[in-house]
Image: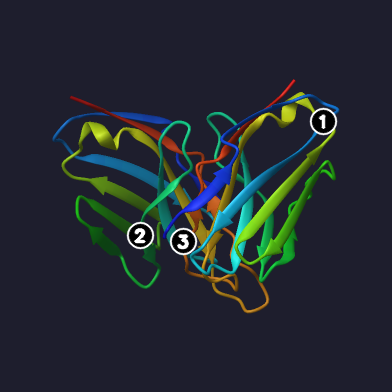
Amino acid sequence: DTEVTQTPKHLVMGMTNKKSLKCEQHMGHRAMYWYKQKAKKPPELMFVYSYEKLSINESVPSRFSPECPNSSLLNLHLHALQPEDSALYLCASSQDPIGGSSEAFFGQGTRLTVV
Amino acid sequence: DQQVKQNSPSLSVQEGRISILNCDYTNSMFDYFLWYKKYPAEGPTFLISISSIKDKNEDGRFTVFLNKSAKHLSLHIVPSQPGDSAVYFCAATPERMKTSYDKVIFGPGTSLSVIP
């Protein structure tokens, strides 16, 4: 199993809603990531979890709240989002969280629209 | 300041010809480079990588060349196929440091169209 699975694939939410994005991998990877990608732009790193602990938060607003319940799961809780938060949210995982040379495996992403 | 640059936003190539996608970087600490391919509405897929101790890595139709002195790398696809039409992201990671964590820096991407 070399997949990173994200649910849902599409999500439309209002600015007062609370929703969660889910990500799962069963490759035994110990680093998991949330990226945000706007149209025609590269993915931008949001959070890094290493051994289930948050290790990097790239100054992301508190309306995005990550959670890593176990080594296979990564959630992103959303609350009071703005229309400009509409984007493709990508989850990724990699084997080695301590520096250097391992590629990340990406999920298909959740296309989020905030109305 | 963009640390990983892909100066061609788009590229069109005839089927069967060679596609050359270029990437430049500014951070001399980068020592591992990756190419990702992304189809619309999908996440990026890892394609090929190269370590700074090498100047070439080949995998089937895909070859990546690294010129460290010029801080430049390129991805060659030979022969190009219509299914190669996608956005290609160049990415780089810094030297392994025990107190730091892996962080992939992506370039802005080049959209490749392979014309049948």
Near-viewer residue (B40 or A11) = A11
Tell me the number on the disc at residue A17: 1
Horizontally, is A30 left or right of A59 in the view?
left
Mark 2 neighbour density, 10 Å: few (under 14) some (14–19) many (20 or more): some
The chain to which mark 2 is attached is B
Identify the residue at horizontal 45%, vertical 41% (top origin): B6
Marks 2 and 1 belong to one chain: no
Task: Residue B34: name its quadrant.
Answer: bottom left
Mark 2 element type: strand
Q: Are marks 2 and 1 in contact (CB under 8 Å)?
A: no
What's under tag 2, amino acid-wise? Asn
Q: Residue A4 in the image: x percent, y percent?
A: 50, 53
Q: Residue A9 in the image: x percent, y percent?
A: 56, 35
Q: CA distance from mark 1 to mark 3?
A: 35 Å
The chain to which mark 1 is attached is A
Q: Are marks 1 and 3 in contact (CB under 8 Å)?
A: no
Q: Residue A110 in the image: x percent, y percent?
A: 59, 37
Q: CA distance from mark 2 to mark 1?
A: 50 Å
Return the residue found at the far bottom: B98
What's under tag 3, amino acid-wise? Glu
Sequence order check, earlier mark of 1 and 3: 1
Mark 3 neighbour density, 10 Å: few (under 14) some (14–19) many (20 or more): many
Mark 1 element type: loop
Q: Which residue is mark 2?
A: B67
Q: Residue B106 in the image: x percent, y percent?
A: 53, 48
Horizontally, is A83 left or right of B7 in the view?
right
For the residues carrying marks 2 and 1, which lies nearer the camera in this image?
1
Q: Which residue is mark 3?
A: A103
| Residue B17 visible in the displayed image | yes
